[in-house]
Amino acid sequence: MSQMDHPRNLRERAESRVATQPPEIPAIPELTSEGAQRLVHELQVHQIELEIQNEELRRLMSALQQSRDQFSRLFHRAPIGYVVLDEVGLIHEVNETFCRMVGRHRPQLIGAPFVEGLAEADRGVFRGRYRALFRQPASKTLEARVQRATGPAFAAQIEGAVLDMPLDGPREQEAPLLMLAVTDITERQAAEAQRLHLERQMQQTQKLESLGVLAGGIAHDFNNMLTIILGNASLALDELPPRAPARESLRAIEKTALRAAELCRQMLAYSGRGRFIIEPIRLDSLIREMAALLQASIAKKALLNLHLKEALPPLRGDPSQIRQVVMNLVINASEALGENGGVITLATGLLHGTRDTLAKFTVEGPLIEVDYVWLDVSDTGCGMDPDTQQRMFEPFFTTKFTGRGLGLSAVLGIVRGHQGALKVSSAPSQGTTFKVLFPIEPEGRRPPPPAHLPLSEGLGRGTVLLVDDEDALRTLGARMLERIGFQVLAASDGQAALELYQARRGEIVLALLDRTMPGMDGEEMFRRLRQIDPQVPVVMTSGYAETGIVPRFTDQPRCGFLQKPYTLEALTERLREVLETGEPES
């Protein structure tokens, strides 16, 4: 209905009502009866028009109040805080949600400067961007910390919208208002920080895994080369007379090759593929036995404290590798102290590994929720910045002018190889703490100590099946076996070796297999041989020494493992163990 139609409609409605209720017209001397009737009719029509208009106004006012109440409920009960500011930044209106967020009542906030409710460090930023919010609020957001009446400030995201119409009636000069939407993003920031932490942890783990694969591959190939050097040196020493001048040179070659082999073992330890002699270990007893050596290894001004928990359950591992972990961490702590000295503390304890607890540690793959023995090595030294912490497990990385070892890299590899985990807490000038976890040994898995194996004469009888894909290693292996007294059948791959074994099975007394070969590798070759003859003696050799493979293989009867590089003496001893006892040391 148009505005011009509305009065006509009222007029028609009023006339209709007068027609149904004829008026009683009093006698007025100045007016004729007809004139008076017309006058009263007009007055009654106007009266009814006013009543109808009042009725419409009451209905509109009720609808307006209902709309206002609904807007107020939406405004005050919104899930985010709303603050309305005037042109100078004073709070003009605020909803109940924001009042709850800051822990204040509405009267305390109305008229107060909004900027005073922000953390002091964020006030300058808000003042600088306030006018920009007024000019173009749609594209402007701001993150700031908002203070509470009590308790810590919370992180908030602030977005703006200009209100051209006032909230409660006309304002002077009709100046616009700025409405800010304030969202508490504390949980969002915490979740984002956790996500970034997990991403960095995953990237670091992937980086360390890649470096571990690289280190293990280099160590494997280098071990193969050292096998040739060390084996030929052993053969030459065995051939020379006792007083030959060349013996000293060969001894030097052998000694240097063994030192290089030790470096390879550290690289294999870093890659988590080191050779372990597994047995139950009491961590507190092991550290007490090392106490004198540890004290002698640290700086003179350093103080060594031991806080070792008594009667810890044993962990299952290689004692020499665990000693290396302790020694490397203590030496690292001593170097962090520098010339000024300080305190190094070793502590042990027992921890039940829950999912939340284990998520804080650096590991390779998921850890099982079992009990762990822990070792803490802490110092009061210089600490490490975040960049150093990101790189500290890289091979050969160092912050010192001297030293190019694999200390922390080997520690990480040994811990991973023992299905453990570690965590580092450090900050510049705040010292460093390394926390290492090792799973405890399950009950009923404590093997008896290996018996001493007596030596015997006449070892080299029969034929050995030698399988290796490298020509130089086959040639060297054949020479060493012949020196011991065996005849040799050599094969360059698993399929050719199986054919030789099936053709001359009656002559072969032992198979010497390389673990890593193209096509059919040593493990598959071992299974195929055992399908033919379950009692055939087998010795596996490898430049690797994977902890998962070695126990599984050496637990079989009449089997042994020989780590490359090896000497003639080491080969002789391992063959004797397998042929004479069938229960080799693992």
Image (cartoon, rainbow, N blue to C red):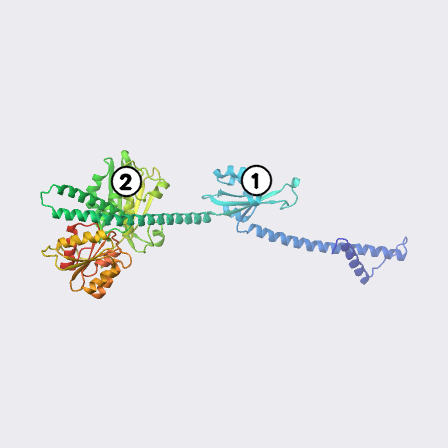
Question: Which residue, given by chain and number where applicable, does mark 1 sit on?
Answer: 132
What amino acid is at disc 2? Arg
Characterize the local packing of mark 1: few (<14), some (14-19) or many (20 or more) Cα atoms within 10 angstroms.
some
Residue nearest the viewer, comparing 534 with 277: 534
Q: Residue 248 shows which numbered tag?
A: none
331 with respect to 122 (left or right): left
Image vertical order of residue 30 relative to residue 128, above or below: below
Residue 103 visible, this orientation: no
Which quadrant of the figure contains the C terminus?
bottom left
Residue nearest the viewer, comparing 96 with 180: 180
Residue shown at the point (71%, 55%) measured from the top left: 56
Residue shown at the point (77%, 57%) measured from the top left: 9
163 with respect to 326 (left or right): right
Question: Which residue, given by chain and number where applicable, does mark 2 sit on?
Answer: 404
Q: Helix, strand, or loop for circle 2?
A: loop
What amino acid is at disc 1? Ala
Residue nearest the viewer, comparing 361 with 77: 361
Residue shown at the point (36%, 49%) measured from the top left: 206
Question: Extreme bottom residue here?
Answer: 532
Question: Can you tell which quarter of the image residue 380 is in?
Answer: top left
The spot of residue 462 in percent (x, y) is: 13, 60
The spot of residue 256 in percent (x, y) is: 20, 43
The spot of residue 244 in percent (x, y) is: 10, 43
Characterize the local packing of mark 2: few (<14), some (14-19) or many (20 or more) Cα atoms within 10 angstroms.
few
Image vertical order of residue 431 relative to residue 358, above or below: above
Question: Can you tell which quarter of the image residue 110 is in?
Answer: top right
Residue 260 visible, this orientation: yes
